[in-house]
Amino acid sequence: MREDLARWQFAFTSVNHFLFVPVTIGLAFLTALLQTAWHRRGGSEYLRLTRFFGTLLVINVAIGVVTGLVQEFEFGMNWSAYSKLVGNIFGAPLAMEGLAAFFLESTFLGLWLFGWDKLSRRVHLATIWLVALGSVLSAAFIMAANSWMQHPVGYLMVHGKPQLTDIWALFTNPVFIWSYAKVVLAALVTGAAVMLAVSAWQLRRGGDRAVFTRSARLGLIVLVPAILLAMLVGDELGVIEARYQPMKIAAAEAQWKTCQPCAFSLIQIGGGNNDHAPTQILAIPHLLSLLATNHWNGKVVGMTPLQAQYAAKYGPGNYVPNVFVQYWGMRAMAYLAVIVFLVGVWGLWLSRRKKLGTARRFLWTAQWLVILPFLINTAGWLLTESGRQPWIVQGIMLTKHGLSPTVSTPMLWTSVIAFVLLYGTLGTVDLLLMLRYSRKELAPAPAQDAAGEPVPAMEY
């Protein structure tokens, strides 16, 4: 019970925090693009859009920071045994994130917010790009720490405890390289979908067509290649995980027996932890072999032989993750990504025909499309973290051994309920603020926007 509650608590806080992270990374990049367009081309349209979407960025950053702080304390309170064993490795990239990336992002966000009427246009433009850089650096350090848990590298075991011997190994870890690329691309997809949805709502409700058509087009220009690249990177990440975490990939296909070549089931019945004989309704021959090995006739080891191997190597126990979560998490992520891509292509086609601002069916669809990236991101995190179980650090420490010995079940129940209420409140506040400010009319163009000159400060 204690292990389940501690896992549920951390999963709940992590998933909620990751609702804000992609929006921050994506909107920071898109806002920087809008301000760059204003800096290079002049005119008031891009300046007004920069301020409009910059306001949404600031709201999201403020709420996102609060939701992220809790996780640092959870490592010490609920998972102290884990922190004691691997804290000298896991803590290094986290310290880098706090001391370097977070301070970079927060410092230059403040300069960007309050420097409109104090900094030159060129210097002010640099501040928003540094905000975007800080956000991606922050994600890099976090992903380096997480990837080490998935595939530990750069360490030696000293008296039963892993000691870091090569810090650069954390940042050349193949799992880190591909998972980090996927996270950044997913963030661009999320930010672009938010920009597209807000622009579509404004266009449907009579907002400035000339201005919001530009932001909708920018959202599509970023969205389509980003989601396509995210799918390709995700495919290569599957190959890497099949190499280092074969149980995760076998569970994602509910593949109990070893196969060669292997078909990919589009949908099936059964195949869960208590059903080793699923009924595949639609299956594509050889596709799983390609996805897991990059070879037409590649071999995928099944969960049953893997379970026997792990039991012989690590001792008795159940080393199979939740197959239902893995199987459907994989498909939710992939199928929804295809929908996002197709809708994005539809939008680019309308933009090419100069009908983007008036195509009401597309604009209605684009409004609701914004939900899908959040579902994709959540499914991806479930796939990644659930697939590692029962390990908290692959091959080194089981999750059940990472719990704090002094945290009781009543304490965990209390904290879980408190976090549900707190995060529910924060999420509601963020949603209401984002809706309120995304539905406001564009502010009028500032009176002073000559090249090289500061402009009046933003109003909230």
Image: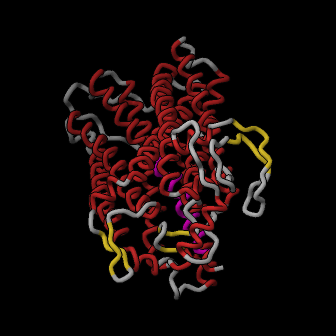
The x and y percentages for residue 15 are: 55, 58
Residue plotted at (60% across, 79% down): 412
218 vs 422, nearest the viewer? 218
Residue plotted at (31% across, 45% down): 133
The x and y percentages for residue 229 are: 47, 34
The x and y percentages for residue 398 are: 53, 74
74 vs 114, nearest the viewer? 74
Above or below residue 250? Residue 48 is: above
Instruction: Judge whether residue 268 is colored magenta.
Output: no
Q: Residue placed farthest to the top in the image?
A: 353
Q: Quadrant of residue 205?
A: top right
Instruction: Judge whether residue 19 is colored magenta.
Output: yes
Give the side of residue 406 with respect to residue 331, left or right: left
Our reading of the magenta stretch's main secondary structure is helix
The x and y percentages for residue 348 are: 53, 20
Residue plotted at (63% across, 63% down): 321
456 vs 88, nearest the viewer? 88
Give the side of residue 86 with respect to residue 334, left or right: left
Above or below residue 5? Residue 132 is: above
Specify start and end residues of the magenta stretch as a single range: 4-23
Q: Quadrant of residue 296?
A: top right
Q: How many marks?
A: 0
Give the side of residue 331 with respect to residue 76, left or right: right
Above or below residue 5? Residue 322 is: above
Visible residue check, residue 67: yes
Q: Residue placed farthest to the bottom in the image?
A: 406
Residue plotted at (54% across, 68% down): 10
Visible residue check, residue 113: no
Look at the image and tell me in which quarter the N terminus lies: bottom right
